[in-house]
Image (cartoon, rainbow, N blue to C red):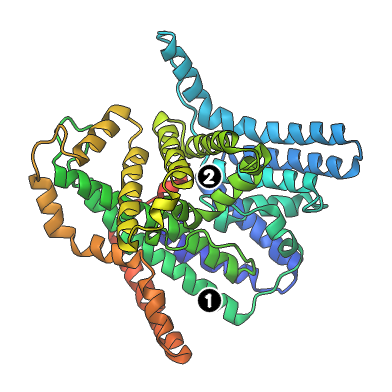
Amino acid sequence: MVFSSLTFLLLFLPLLFALYFVRSSLRWRNGVLLVMSLLFYAWGEPVWIVAMIAATLVNYFCAAAIERSHDPRRRKLILALGVAVSLSFLLYFKYSAFFLNSFAALFGLSWRMEAPRMPIGISFYTFQILTYSVDVYRGKAQAQRSPLRLLLYVSCFPQLIAGPIVQYADIEAQLGERSVLPDDFTAGMQRFVKGLAKKVLLANVCGAALGELTLAGTGAAMSVAGAWMGAFLYTIQLYFDFSAYSDMAIGLGKALGFTYKENFDFPYASLSVTEFWRRWHISMGSFFRDYVYIPLGGSRCGRARTIRNIAVVWALTGLWHGASWNFVLWGLYFAVLLVLERYVLKDVLAHVPRLLRWFVCFVLVMISWVVFYYTDLSAMAQHVLALFGVGVSGLSDAAAAAVARKYSFYPLLAWVLSLPVVPAVARRLGERTRSVVGLVCTVLLFVASLLFLVGQSYNPFIYFRF
């Protein structure tokens, strides 16, 4: 089940709210939310919900044992057990075929393993389970006394499938005490509708336009215009698709009494790659910083080891996104750019005009999304080379021209909306005017989204596959 479906909007969500708010008891609301969250996940993963529950229960017992123990070595062994169990599910479903097939190909073996069907959102809920055990081990949080309350943290449907990654220490208190004020519910649903509109009216339309282009791997040569148009469309689609889910998750969480941290902060307005990664998928960056980069030593251990730590973190960040070498290359691409900005270009960038810095950053990010898009390395290389006029059919092609005529309004509008233009305009309005305009826009966007959904086919979020 996806947020941008009529089943969710017209059946699941009204039923949830009716049951959730019929009583004010937190125990009742937690129970309703847990049952509905498990139903939400089982709708698409009726079998592999067992893996999520099993990993949660193992870490529940491990964290309890860690808290009771005063032996440092025993605590580390118990933590290692919980982490190993959680990662074993992730490694099997997501990476077993990738590593074994890569090994076989390296030694010229013909044997291949068929990849098992990967549970939706396994990377996200695995990371959340890990933050619980590690936070208890570090003393940042207390072990949860109720296994059902811990399962609610892991399975809570707003952020279950595609984030944001919610660290246990940030949500611990809200599992045991929270309230929903009318203003919070209204603000939460407005945020949800904003995300729905971003997904249905912008991301899906950019995706449809992208599907009509001649892309690499089809057997036909790309044009320069088609290559850049494809990169631009995917850049816009990916942002609005993923930030839409985050908006919807944060909004639903607020409507249910939870406060989730922001996950996007207009990343395409960044003036450097370093700034971009402070604004894009913030919860993932925080996870790798807190649970990988800093434990490795961070930037406190000299230049050589800092560069090594950056490379390790970004290789893992790439691999987290998918079991394919293009994701590893994508991660290392950013590692190189980040190292260059920190150690080579830092003084130079300070004297470059802001507009030029923004343009260069945006182009570098667009190129990165081309690497991200293709799991076929030869197709990826073909598209990247086509951006610079290598191996192309010409400057333009019929498909690119047709897409430009048919869809030009939507991608350009989306690109403008990806920048902090709307907040800048809203700040100029009075508080009362802003409230009225916001309410009217929410109603119009919801109606428009429903009308678009009636005519659209299945529209899953891109990050579901991660």
Residue 192 located left or right of residue 147: left
Q: Position of residue 432 (x, y in %)?
A: 46, 91
Q: Amino acid at mark 2?
A: Gly
Q: Counting other residues with Cα less than 10 Å from the Cα at mark 1, is it few (<14), some (14-19), or many (20 or more)? A: some
As drawn, is 396 to the left or to the right of 423?
left
Read off the residue under disc 2.
121
The quadrant where residue 305 appears = top right
Q: How far, Cα to Cα, is label 2 from label 1?
A: 26 Å
Query: Which is nearer the eye, 457 or 315?
Result: 315
Residue drawn at the location 53% of the way across and 55% of the way down: 282
Give coordinates of residue 370: x percent, y percent. 31, 41
- With respect to residue 443, does 294 lie above or below? above
Image position of 427 with respect to 302: above or below: below
Name the residue beneath numbered marker 1: 187
For the question of whether residue 203 can be seen, the reply is no
How far across and how far down the image is residue 452, in percent?
A: 30, 64
- At a point 37% along the width and 66% down the height, the residue shown is 197
The secondary structure type at the circle numbered 2 is: loop
Question: Under tag 1, what secondary structure?
Answer: helix
How many other residues sit within 10 Å of disc 2, few (<14), some (14-19) or many (≥20)? some
For the point 64% across and 66% down, which residue is it?
A: 258
Q: Quadrant of residue 331?
A: top left
Residue at point 45%, 50% (across, down): 346
| Amino acid of disc 1 | Ala
Q: Classify residue 394 as left or right of residue 301.
A: left
Q: Which of 275 and 198 lies nearest the eye of the viewer?
A: 275
The answer to whether residue 302 is visible is yes
- Taking depth in this image into account, of 3 and 216 the one nearest to the observer is 216
